[in-house]
């Protein structure tokens, strides 16, 4: 089914392999993740994650064959959403959030599709949402979390720049603020003081904004331990380029701290 003309939501197509079966959904934004996403989905299947939440792929226009319907169905993927519009991660998330809220989910978990994160921990995010938390941030840097082969530059930038600025802006301490493994309550995403469905969120703005807005408006937020593992050797699986990508992230942080993204 094609969705278009929805304010603040990119044009996209949905392929629903099954109806809604759970109260919670895992959204996985990808673009050309190849074997990484298939390995991640295999781990999810082995851990029976689909017993806890529906799994939905939010594709940015992959051309590598990783979103083949037969593969996704065999790995317990509930639906595939394919963006047909401009924008990167922020647009993919807006697409997924809108679709998930329209479908009636109580809470949304997001996780990268590059097989770096412990998708086996999805039930722990659901537990926190059920306890009444509106924003749950996964962290490799708190007790119980594991940071495996984290590149030194990434470690220092999170510890010394990203996390301190996000924590200051949110008025609550967070330790792993570039980590997209997190959860949001329906109440949070639909609050008039949040309004995530705006075209200002095209790249990484939405992740930064949603990291701070919950506590700014008096909602409950927490961190839970997760594992993030980078490969021992070879190219680091990331969509953030060293110079341009990181300078863009810094600009977003500053704009976020100034309240530019607030409604």
Image (spheres, helix red, strand yellow):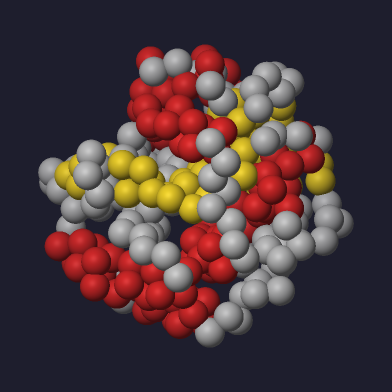
Q: In x, y percent, where is residue 227?
A: 27, 40
Q: Is residue 145 left or right of residue 48?
A: left
Q: Is residue 80 above or below residue 225?
A: above
Residue drawn at x 60%, y 52% as measured from the top left: 93
Q: Is residue 84 visible?
A: no
Q: Is residue 79 left or right of residue 27?
A: right
Q: In x, y percent, where is residue 136?
A: 47, 47
Q: Quadrant of the N terminus?
A: top right
Picture quarter containing residue 102? top right
Q: Is residue 209 left or right of residue 44?
A: right
Q: Is residue 19 visible?
A: yes
Residue drawn at x 32%, y 72% as measured from the top left: 164
Residue drawn at x 38%, y 15% as measured from the top left: 46
Q: Give the number of callouts.
A: 0
Picture quarter containing residue 249? bottom left
Q: In x, y percent, where is residue 82?
A: 65, 43
Q: Is residue 110 above or below residue 157?
A: above
Q: In x, y percent, where is residue 254?
A: 45, 82
Q: Quadrant of the C terminus?
A: bottom right
Q: Nearer the viewer, residue 251 or 14?
A: 251
Q: In this view, does 228 lie above or below 123?
A: below
Q: Which of 67 and 78 is in front in this view?
A: 78
């Amino acid at each position: 089914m094609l969705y278009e003309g929805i304010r603040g939501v990119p044009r996209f197509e949905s392929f629903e392999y099954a109806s809604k079966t759970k109260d919670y959904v895992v959204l996985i934004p990808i673009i050309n993740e190849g074997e990484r996403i298939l390995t991640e989905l295999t781990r999810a299947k082995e851990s029976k994650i689909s017993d806890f939440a529906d799994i939905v792929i939010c594709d940015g226009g992959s051309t590598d064959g990783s979103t083949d319907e037969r593969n996704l169905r065999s790995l317990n993927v509930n639906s595939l959403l394919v963006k047909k519009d401009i924008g990167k991660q922020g647009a993919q998330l807006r697409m997924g959030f809108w679709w998930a809220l329209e479908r009636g989910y109580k809470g949304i978990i997001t996780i990268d599709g590059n097989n770096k994160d412990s998708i086996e921990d999805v039930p722990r995010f659901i537990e926190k949402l059920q306890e009444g938390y509106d924003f749950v941030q996964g962290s490799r840097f708190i007790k119980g979390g594991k940071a495996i082969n984290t590149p030194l530059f990434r470690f220092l930038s999170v510890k010394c720049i990203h996390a301190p600025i996000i924590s200051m802006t949110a008025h609550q301490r967070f330790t792993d603020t570039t980590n997209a493994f997190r959860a949001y309550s329906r109440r949070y995403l639909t609050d008039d003081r949040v309004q995530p469905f705006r075209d200002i969120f095209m790249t990484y703005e939405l992740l930064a904004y949603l990291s701070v807005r919950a506590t700014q408006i008096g909602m409950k937020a927490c961190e839970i331990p997760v594992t993030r593992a980078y490969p021992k050797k070879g190219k680091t699986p990331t969509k953030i380029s060293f110079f341009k990508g990181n300078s863009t992230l810094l600009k977003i942080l500053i704009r976020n701290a100034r309240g530019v993204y607030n409604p």
